[in-house]
Image (cartoon, grey):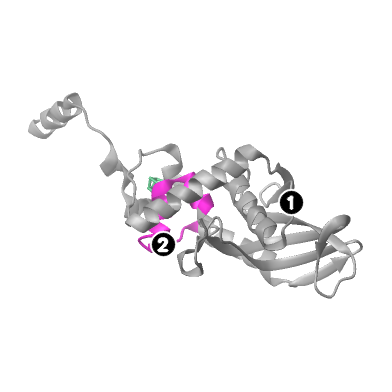
Amino acid sequence: MEFNEEDFLQLSGIQHFIFCKRQWALIHIEKQWCENEKTVDGQFFHKNAHDKIRHERRGNTLISRGMYVHSRELGLSGQCDVVEFYKCENGINIVGEKDLWQPYPIEYKRGKKKPTLCDEAQVCAQAMCLEEMYCCNIPEGAIYYGENRHRMNVDLNEKIRNLVRESVKEMHDLYTRGQNPKVRKKKSCESCSLVGICMPELFEENTVEDYIQRMIKLEK
Ligand code: SF4
């Protein structure tokens, strides 16, 4: 099945979705947003990655910033922070260039590596878009973490590709139904800018014992 452009979801949403499905739904279905220190900082960081020079050549490498990508198979579209193109014998053609080139997407993140694979999935989704657009194979990408100034290579293996496919399928299903899933309150809620809108404590399951304890406290 192929998606039409009007049904494309935002590629960057996959990172929100894997971090927290409810956060993704609040932002992308309910169109809610709230800034905190981390999100503002992150936007400045991304603006720097995108906005400096759009295309640049360094030796045998071409660097493209803010490149638009899409995939009809995944139903995603978005922008890559940076795509580097390495000169390579079995690479792709680029208009205006006589050599062949291997694309290599790099996602910029303000913080450090997270416990989930949300950042890896984002760079993998970018690579899958590039593969579809250029009919090529991209075995590796990278994430640059600003907090420790570390560039981490990401092996775009079947495991991460399946995570992307399964996540995107669920995102489309939820989006079509307009459904915002309920989730359990977790440690990461403390750093979520949407905690005030989401109110995750309302989803906490209360036992009969909790209820009795609350009633006893109220009566005191
Ligand atoms: S507060 Fe927690 S449950 Fe709610 S959107 Fe944020 S991370 Fe998800």
x%, y% of residue 155? 71, 41
Specify the quadrant that holds the C terminus: top left
| Residue segment shown in magenta | 14-37
x%, y% of residue 43? 57, 63
In this picture, residue 3 sits left or right of residue 106: left
Which secondary structure lies at badge 1? loop
Q: Is residue 108 visible?
A: no
Residue linked to disc 2: 33
**Residue visible at 28% across and 41% down in the picture:** 203
Residue linked to disc 1: 137
How many circles with numbers are drawn on the protein? 2
Spot the residue most to the right: 59
Q: Is residue 169 visible?
A: yes
x%, y% of residue 131? 69, 56
The alpha-carbon separation of the residues under discs 1 and 2 comes to: 36 Å
Q: Label 1 is placed on what type of residue?
A: Asn
Spot the residue most to the bottom: 96
Q: Label 2 is placed on what type of residue?
A: Trp
Disc 2 crowd rating (10 Å Cα; few below 14, some 14-19, many 20+) is few
Q: Earlier in the sequence, mark 1 or mark 2?
A: 2
x%, y% of residue 12? 55, 57
**Residue visible at 86% across and 55% down in the picture:** 90
In this picture, residue 70 sits left or right of residue 167: right
